[in-house]
Image (cartoon, rainbow, N blue to C red):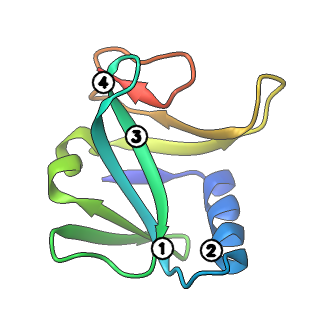
Amino acid sequence: MINLTDSAISVLKAAIASTTQAASGLRITVEGGGCQGFTYKMDLAHEPSSEETVFEQGGVKVFVDNASRAHLSGTTIDFVVSLEGSGFRFDNPNAKSSCSCGKSCR
């Protein structure tokens, strides 16, 4: 379904451990918007809703709503550190195009 790189797993574990609010995993959704038509949203979450699929990779639980699952199937999420800025990058084989920031797609 979704693949998290070792770098993404490391950053997510640190974020979950250091948050002041209870969090047990990462919620990922695809919503309308962004410069390409869809945008990726990520939030720390305490528990999944009844409309979400849960999977775990490298000790990180990931919650994906059923509407976003088809858009995210086969996606690799990485955490990249570069001169342009650090952040999560989505490599989505389902996207027809994506923006240079890696946070929205069509």
Circle 1 is placed at which residue position? 25
Secondary structure, mark 2, is helix
* Lateral position of residue 96 relative to residue 60, left or right: left
- Type of amino acid under label 3: Tyr
Secondary structure, mark 1, is strand
Measure how far apart labels 3 and 1 are at the Cα level: 16 Å
Q: Is residue 83 above or below residue 96?
A: below
Secondary structure, mark 4, is loop
Tell me if mark 4 has few (under 14), some (14-19) or many (20+) residues whose alpha carbon lies within 10 angstroms of its own: some
* Lateral position of residue 71 relative to residue 39, left or right: left
* Lateral position of residue 35 relative to residue 69, left or right: right
**Sequence-wise first label, 3 or 2:** 2
Measure how far apart labels 4 and 3 are at the Cα level: 12 Å
The structure residue drawn at horizontal position 38% and vertical position 32%, both measured from the top left corner, is 92
Which quadrant of the structure image shows residue 106? top left
Circle 3 is placed at which residue position? 40
Q: Nearer the viewer, residue 20 or 5?
A: 20
Q: What numbered label is drawn on residue 91? A: none
**Sequence-wise first label, 1 or 4:** 1
- Type of amino acid under label 4: Ala
**Sequence-wise first label, 3 or 1:** 1
Q: What numbered label is drawn on residue 16? A: 2
Measure how far apart labels 1 and 4 are at the Cα level: 25 Å
- Type of amino acid under label 2: Ile
- Type of amino acid under label 1: Gly
The structure residue drawn at horizontal position 48% and vertical position 36%, both measured from the top left corner, is 90
